[in-house]
Image: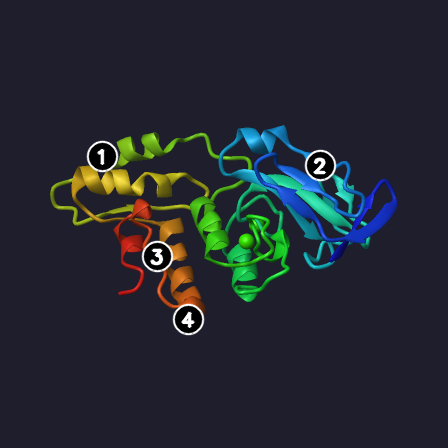
């Protein structure tokens, strides 16, 4: 439960979310809500929300305005952006990991599919966007795949794609299939390390071969 501040009026209650409609529902009156056609139109995007105090943002600037106490913040962002800073990275993973296994939880604590639970479903949403920003890079996975193939050499045992705010991770499996060599990317490597930490809490993690060979052998 948390308070929501709209137009100076603070309310409290559990928020529900209609994932398909991207509509936030406030059950205390059963009416109204927050709609986002932008989130509905962009794969990987959603309306993130969070308690300003929990996020340490009271008194800070958010969306161009100073955040008041007892506020709930909303942002069109990528799945996995727990702290609403527009990036999906280790800061968000740490929030998810700290609340892993919790029920009656919230977006800012790692519940990215709005079911109240923080579990592998939420981790998978975060993993799919790991290293990406809400602004979104313009270089496509196809561009990265083409670049890797153009720069491959016979004496190279593998390919390393550096830097984080890219969509390289989406190109890894394609490059590996084409070149027959392992491909490692910054986001993927950090994610691999994060999964290793998480496995202490959840045991075996389902392999994610769509993110490359490294992520296909998570329990080795
Ligand atoms: Ca973030
Ligand atoms: Ca969840």
Q: Residues within 10 Å of mark 2 (few under 14, many from 20)?
A: few
Secondary structure under the numbered disc 4 in the rendered image:
helix
Task: Give the CA distance from mark 4 to mark 2.
Answer: 37 Å
Foreground disc of the pair 4, 2 = 2
Q: Which residue is mark 1?
A: 149
Q: Specify whether tag 4 is near ligand 2 (CB below 8 Å).
A: no
> Residue visible at 28% across and 54% down?
216
**Could you say which quadrant of the image residue 47 lies in?**
top right
Q: Which residue is mark 2?
A: 34
In the shown orientation, is residue 180 left or right of residue 143? Answer: left
The percent position of residue 189, horizontal first and vertical second, equals 36, 55
- If the image is split into quadrants, where does the C terminus sit? bottom left
Q: Residues within 10 Å of mark 3 (few under 14, many from 20)?
A: few
Q: Residues within 10 Å of mark 4 (few under 14, many from 20)?
A: few
Q: Is residue 207 above or below residue 77?
A: below
Ranked by sequence position, the earlier of labels 1 and 2 is 2
> Residue visible at 81% across and 43% down?
29
Task: Give the CA distance from mark 1 to mark 4.
Answer: 37 Å
Q: Which residue is mark 4?
A: 200
Task: Give the CA distance from mark 1 to mark 2.
Answer: 44 Å
> Residue visible at 63% across and 58% down?
105
Secondary structure under the numbered disc 1 in the rendered image:
helix
Q: How is the image coloured?
A: rainbow
Q: Which residue is mark 3?
A: 206
The percent position of residue 147, horizontal first and vertical second, equals 28, 33
Task: Give the CA distance from mark 3 to mark 2.
Answer: 34 Å
The percent position of residue 148, horizontal first and vertical second, equals 26, 37
> Residue visible at 40% across and 46% down?
163
Q: Specify whether tag 2 is near ligand 2 (CB below 8 Å).
A: no
**Do the residues bearing badges 3 and 4 touch, measured as CB atoms within 8 Å?**
no
């Amino acid at each position: 439960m948390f308070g929501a501040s709209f137009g100076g009026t603070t309310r409290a209650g559990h928020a529900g979310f209609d994932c398909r409609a991207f509509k936030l529902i406030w059950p205390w009156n059963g009416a109204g809500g927050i709609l986002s056609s932008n989130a509905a139109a962009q794969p990987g995007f959603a309306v993130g929300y969070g308690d300003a105090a929990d996020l340490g943002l009271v008194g800070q600037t958010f969306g161009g305005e100073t955040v008041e106490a007892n506020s709930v913040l909303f942002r069109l962002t990528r799945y996995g952006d727990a702290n609403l800073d527009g990036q999906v990275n280790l800061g968000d993973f740490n929030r998810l990991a700290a609340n892993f296994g919790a029920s009656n939880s919230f977006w800012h604590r790692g519940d990215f599919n709005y079911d109240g639970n923080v579990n592998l479903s939420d981790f998978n949403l975060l993993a799919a966007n790991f290293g990406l920003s809400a602004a979104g890079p313009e270089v496509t996975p196809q561009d990265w795949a083409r670049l890797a193939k153009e720069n491959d050499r016979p004496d190279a045992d593998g390919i390393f794609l550096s830097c984080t705010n890219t969509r390289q991770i989406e190109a890894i499996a394609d490059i590996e299939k084409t070149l027959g060599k392992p491909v490692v990317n910054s986001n993927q490597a950090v994610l691999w390390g994060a999964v290793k930490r998480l496995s202490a809490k959840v045991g075996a993690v389902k392999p994610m071969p769509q993110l490359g060979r490294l992520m296909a052998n998570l329990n080795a």
